[in-house]
Image (cartoon, helix red, strand yellow):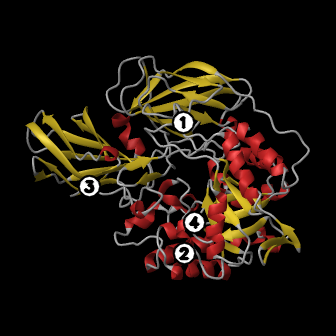
């Protein structure tokens, strides 16, 4: 593959002027069987490059474990990009933001109570060096200098919005160089953060979604010589639970893209195709109020969550054609979709009756955080005996992020971090009654100073002012549902429960699970964790990638945390429901 160079104010590729026209496409948000399809559609829109982050927390789930296989086979993804004739911008972090759990930083870092993330803290640097030492060497052959598709590699991510420690950026850049990265390095920041986030001697780029002239002028004032590039042209946005579905007018977005490209600058669309925060991988924001991101990462992008072209796809394709060659092949059409109405979930397995299959208990005097338990995602169940009976006030120093409270198995209320709740009045039936708090990690903060976001119950728990001790902490990561004892029948189930059913498929195709009447929980299809649902919205359906399905019988399991839908049915429909948009 040709090699990218920086010559004066231009990029060159093997000596010829080159403009990067790229789009975000995160392999970890796309089923691997669909990588080739999404890459082909990127080329058909006129992109010559794709960009991807690399999520440290998935690749190194524990300090002594590293993965680069299956759905995390980044070398395979890069090889597919090259086969499609696409270059790649690689953004390995270690911090990526991306509306991803913890900004991609692994939760086990937070088991160290004193660690300072994204800094020169030796504990953090040692972990980063271990990560890069595993990640980078297998990718060296994918660099353009070795015949691969990777044109350039980013150092950290929007560091100026977090800190201004140039020594830290220099340390990361030196580490990348030491491990064999010999293609250009770059940083990216919002225009107001360029001074703090740039690294002398490394190409600085800017992130914005409008007013490109102003953003590029700020970049040029900071960097008098060098190619101008917008590394994140925000053509859409993400959604949060309890908000509305954010959309951006295609015509207006296309005008902004035209304005940007007319300057001669390079661009990376954020996003070309957003994909999905499968499982528990969504992040959150906390600007004085905690706001978790939804499962869908549709992002109102040119390709929607299921990979279908949107109105924005054609609008952007026309703009790009004014400045660069666009393939003569016709634009892709929409894929076939599957509908299976009223799938009955005829078997149930109460969560509290199946605890031995889901996690081993750990005793402690005070509640342990999820990170102290060595757990990444999911839930923790905290249990203790109550020393008194009668009316009582339960107070928790801090809930991260949502606690369902039970006394002797009966639900008595919910405490939500989002609502700044930390106390609940309840009645204790008898001395020795069992208090249970089922605490959900709804996504670690991925941006700003709140990233030291430990999960579970933080601090002490009091009943009528007296500290409760003698806890049992049970991690419930829900990485496997094997062993759950399902039984049939339509009897009501008190408390959280798994509900299971099956449906027949002729030819697998994309679909969307709709859960009208259900409250909150998670969905698995054939063991694949689709993600979270919540009646709070805006999202009211979950994307089912076709490769998850199989001809014949398929299994669907729903964890309902509150009261199951009376009929215990779900629908597979041909269209999604991402919720109302703001008028």
Per the image, label 3 sits on a secondary structure element best described as loop
Mark 2–mark 1 Cα distance, whole angstroms, equals: 46 Å
Query: Is residue 274 positioned above or below 112 on the image?
Result: above
Within-10-Å neighbours for mark 1: few <14, some 14–19, many 20+ = many
Q: Position of residue 210 (x, y in %)?
A: 62, 53
Per the image, label 4 sits on a secondary structure element best described as helix
Mark 4–mark 1 Cα distance, whole angstroms, equals: 42 Å
First along the sequence among labels 4 and 3 = 4
Mark 3–mark 1 Cα distance, whole angstroms, equals: 29 Å
Q: Nearer the viewer, residue 80 or 210?
A: 210
Name the residue carrying label 1.
524
Q: Residue at x 74, y 63 (%)?
A: 265
Name the residue carrying label 4.
191
First along the sequence among labels 3 and 1 = 3
Q: Position of residue 380 (x, y in %)?
A: 35, 48
- Contact? badges 3 and 2 (CB < 8 Å): no
Name the residue carrying label 2.
195
Query: Residue 143 occupies which quadrant of the picture?
Result: bottom right
Mark 4–mark 3 Cα distance, whole angstroms, equals: 43 Å
Image mark for residue 367: 3
Within-10-Å neighbours for mark 2: few <14, some 14–19, many 20+ = some
Q: Is residue 304 visible?
A: no
Mark 4–mark 2 Cα distance, whole angstroms, equals: 9 Å
Within-10-Å neighbours for mark 4: few <14, some 14–19, many 20+ = many
Mark 3–mark 2 Cα distance, whole angstroms, equals: 43 Å
Q: Nearer the viewer, mark 2 or mark 1?
A: 2
First along the sequence among labels 2 and 1 = 2
């Amino acid at each position: 593959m040709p090699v990218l160079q920086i010559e004066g104010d231009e990029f060159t590729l093997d000596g010829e002027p080159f403009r990067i026209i790229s789009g975000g496409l995160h392999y970890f948000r796309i089923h691997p069987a669909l990588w080739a399809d999404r890459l082909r559609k990127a080329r058909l829109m006129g992109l010559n490059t794709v960009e991807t982050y690399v999520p440290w927390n998935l690749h190194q789930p524990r300090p002594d474990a590293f993965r680069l296989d299956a759905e995390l086979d980044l070398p395979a993804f890069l090889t597919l990009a090259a086969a499609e004739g696409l270059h790649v911008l690689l953004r390995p972090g270690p911090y990526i933001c991306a509306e991803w759990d913890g900004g991609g930083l692994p939760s086990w870092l937070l088991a160290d109570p004193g660690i300072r993330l994204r800094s020169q803290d030796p504990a953090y640097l040692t972990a980063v060096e271990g990560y890069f030492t595993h990640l980078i060497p297998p990718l060296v052959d994918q660099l353009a200098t070795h015949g691969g598709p990777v044109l350039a590699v980013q150092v950290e991510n929007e560091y100026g919005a977090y800190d201004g420690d140039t020594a830290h950026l220099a340390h990361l850049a030196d580490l990348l160089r030491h491990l064999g990265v010999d293609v250009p390095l770059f940083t990216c920041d919002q225009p107001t953060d360029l001074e703090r986030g740039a690294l002398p001697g490394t190409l600085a780029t800017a992130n914005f979604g409008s007013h490109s002239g102003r953003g590029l002028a700020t970049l040029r004032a900071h960097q008098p010589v060098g190619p101008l590039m917008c590394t994140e042209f925000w053509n859409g946005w993400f959604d949060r639970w309890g908000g509305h579905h954010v959309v951006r007018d295609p015509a207006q977005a296309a005008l902004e893209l035209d304005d940007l490209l007319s300057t001669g600058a390079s661009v990376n669309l954020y996003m070309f195709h957003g994909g999905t925060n499968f499982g528990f991988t969504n992040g959150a924001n906390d600007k004085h109020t905690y706001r978790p991101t939804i499962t869908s990462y549709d992002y109102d992008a040119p390709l929607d969550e299921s990979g279908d072209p949107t109105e924005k796809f054609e609008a952007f394709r026309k703009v790009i054609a004014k400045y660069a060659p666009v393939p003569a092949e016709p634009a892709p059409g929409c894929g076939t979709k599957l509908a299976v109405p009223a799938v009955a979930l005829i078997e149930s397995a109460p969560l509290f009756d199946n605890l031995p299959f889901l996690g081993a208990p750990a005793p402690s005097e005070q509640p342990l955080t999820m990170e102290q338990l060595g757990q990444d995602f999911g839930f923790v169940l905290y249990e203790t005996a109550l020393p008194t009976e009668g009316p009582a006030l339960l107070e928790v120093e801090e809930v991260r992020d949502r606690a369902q409270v039970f006394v002797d198995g009966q639900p008595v209320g919910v405490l939500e971090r989002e609502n700044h709740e930390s106390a609940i009045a309840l009645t204790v039936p008898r001395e020795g009654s069992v208090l249970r708090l089922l605490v959900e990690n709804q996504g670690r903060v991925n941006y700003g100073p709140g990233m030291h976001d430990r999960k579970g119950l933080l601090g002490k728990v009091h009943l009528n002012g007296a500290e409760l001790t003698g806890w049992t902490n049970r991690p419930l990561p829900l990485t496997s549902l094997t062993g759950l004892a399902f039984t049939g029948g339509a009897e009501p189930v008190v408390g959280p429960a798994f509900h299971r059913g099956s449906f027949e498929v002729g030819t697998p195709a994309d679909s969307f699970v709709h859960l009208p009447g259900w409250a909150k929980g998670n969905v698995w299809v054939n063991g694949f964790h689709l993600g979270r649902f919540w009646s709070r919205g805006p999202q009211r359906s979950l994307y089912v990638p076709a490769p998850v399905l199989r001809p014949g019988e398929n299994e669907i399991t729903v964890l309902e945390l509150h009261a199951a839908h009376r009929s215990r049915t779900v629908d597979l429909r041909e269209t999604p429901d991402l919720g109302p948009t703001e008028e």
